[in-house]
């Protein structure tokens, strides 16, 4: 069985198989300021209560603070939901939902349901985590259950040695290899991901949805447990319990498909409009002039990403024709970046540093693009009109390439 099959089999207490439709208990459910009001409206037609307020997490992150009357009204309705059902796990100003969940809630083997497509991020913990629409989330809030068709699994073996590449480069290249039509598949990552830290694993799983997948997942291991102990302060007793419940896969597992992604001979990657799968070697796009650089998002707004960007920005100024927007993924990341002097480096370079949240990633605020403008972003999507005007252009890269390009005024990895 694949990792997804094993996790769901353990939850149901019997063997399940790919293609089978099952009803499953949800361990954690999350919606944000954009999806909570929609789920709340649907919930009111189903039930006058929620199944377990302690297993629901509400995060304000998409338009924080609200930048339009519509956004303010939306958050007012979401706050009504929080108060009505006494939701204790409410994060009004703590950052992006996926980073908040990673920092405080996700454990291996969980079934996580989120009202956002990038909920697949949490497969980095060895959890089954996926996004649902508003009506589905309402049903989950009412009952604590959902039905799901168990996805077929594609094994993605990342191999090769290339010291120049970041996790973002690797997943952009993987998007190119797999394409965007892996509909309702689970991507089970193997190989080099087992050497990556949790920040990088979160980046890898975050972009599974960009390949059309239901989820991305990585087997929990010592790196997972060390993160939970050192960053989440789980006790030795809690870690020991998780290790005893560890779910692993065998080398001779049978998969729907197996794909080998060899990164040995590629350069740092940049995805060009209008798809993350349009990944190219940086030498093929070097020299394209830019108007904006965005460093942040649920893909690359973590502390490791900010450290990398600051390494290149320290003591330098951004190009006079470029606006650089830096947004830490969470309050926790922001505070650590303050302690380490990273925020000072960004400000002295000429960057805008904004409060934790999604910001310009979805074209909401804090860096919306005008007609014809070009942005180099560390986020996960470069669809047409994604960050503003339909005739603007978004390129995707690693934090390193983004920082260097902000200094030079064009896409490059050379200072």
Image (cartoon, rainbow, N blue to C red):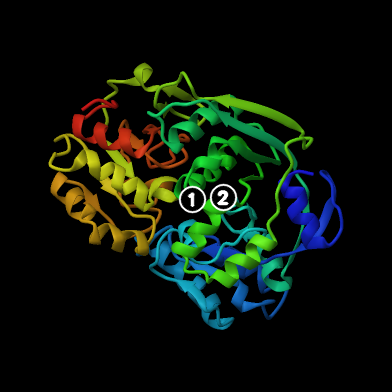
Q: CA distance from mark 2 to mark 1?
A: 7 Å
Circle 2 residue: 124
Vertical position of residue 138 compared to residue 14: above or below: below
x, y percentage for residue 162? 43, 26
Q: Of helix, strand and loop, which one carries label 2?
A: helix
Vertical position of residue 255 compared to residue 3: above or below: above
x, y percentage for residue 353? 25, 53
Q: Of helix, strand and loop, which one carries label 1?
A: helix
x, y percentage for residue 129? 63, 54
Q: Is residue 299 left or right of residue 142?
A: left
Q: Is residue 99 left or right of residue 222?
A: left
Vertical position of residue 160 compared to residue 208: above or below: above
Residue that appears at 72% across and 49% down: 4
The one nearer the camera, 37 or 25, is 25
Mark 2 closeness class: few <14, some 14–19, many ≥20 residues within 10 Å = many
**Quadrant of the rendering where the C terminus is positioned:** top left
Asked if marks 2 and 1 touch (Cβ < 8 Å), the reply is yes
Q: Is residue 135 visible?
A: no
Q: Is residue 225 left or right of residue 133?
A: left
Mark sitting on residue 198: 1
Residue that appears at 47% across and 29% down: 274
Residue 310, picture quadrant: top left
């Amino acid at each position: 069985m694949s990792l997804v099959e094993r996790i769901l089999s353990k939850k149901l207490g019997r063997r399940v198989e790919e293609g089978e439709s099952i009803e499953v208990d949800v361990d954690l459910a999350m919606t944000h300021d954009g999806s909570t009001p929609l789920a709340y409206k649907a919930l009111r037609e189903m039930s006058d209560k929620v199944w377990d307020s302690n297993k629901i997490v509400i995060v304000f992150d998409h338009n924080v603070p609200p930048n339009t009357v519509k956004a303010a009204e939306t958050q007012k309705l979401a706050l009504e939901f929080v108060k009505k059902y006494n939701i204790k796990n409410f994060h009004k100003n703590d950052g992006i939902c996926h980073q908040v969940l990673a920092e405080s809630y996700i454990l291996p083997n969980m079934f996580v349901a989120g009202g956002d497509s990038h909920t697949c991020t949490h497969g980095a913990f060895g959890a089954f985590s996926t996004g649902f629409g508003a009506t589905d989330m309402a049903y989950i809030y009412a009952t604590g259950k959902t039905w799901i068709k168990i996805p077929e699994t594609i094994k993605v073996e990342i191999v090769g040695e290339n010291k120049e590449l970041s996790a973002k480069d690797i997943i952009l290249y993987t998007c190119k290899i797999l394409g965007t039509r892996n509909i309702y598949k689970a991507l089970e990552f193997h190989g080099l991901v087992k050497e990556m830290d949790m920040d990088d694993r979160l980046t890898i799983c975050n972009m599974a949805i960009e390949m059309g997948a239901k989820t991305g997942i990585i087997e929990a291991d010592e790196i997972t447990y060390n993160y939970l102990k050192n960053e989440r302060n789980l006790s030795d007793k809690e870690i020991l319990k998780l290790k005893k419940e560890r779910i692993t896969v065998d080398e001779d597992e049978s998969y729907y498909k197996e794909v080998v992604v060899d990164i040995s001979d590629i350069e740092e990657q940049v995805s060009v409009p209008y798809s993350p799968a349009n990944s190219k070697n940086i030498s093929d796009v070097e020299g394209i002039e830019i108007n904006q650089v965005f460093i942040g998002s649920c893909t690359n707004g973590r502390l490791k990403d900010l450290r990398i960007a600051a390494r290149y920005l320290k003591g330098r100024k951004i190009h006079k024709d470029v606006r650089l927007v830096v947004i830490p993924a969470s309050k926790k990341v922001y505070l650590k970046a303050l302690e380490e002097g990273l925020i000072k480096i960004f400000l002295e370079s000429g960057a805008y540093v904004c409060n934790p949240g999604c910001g310009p990633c979805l074209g909401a605020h804090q860096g919306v693009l005008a007609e014809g403008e070009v942005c180099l972003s560390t986020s996960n999507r470069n669809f047409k009109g994604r960050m503003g005007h339909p005739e603007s252009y978004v390129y995707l890269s690693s934090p390193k390439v983004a920082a260097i390009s902000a200094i030079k005024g064009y896409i490059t990895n050379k200072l």
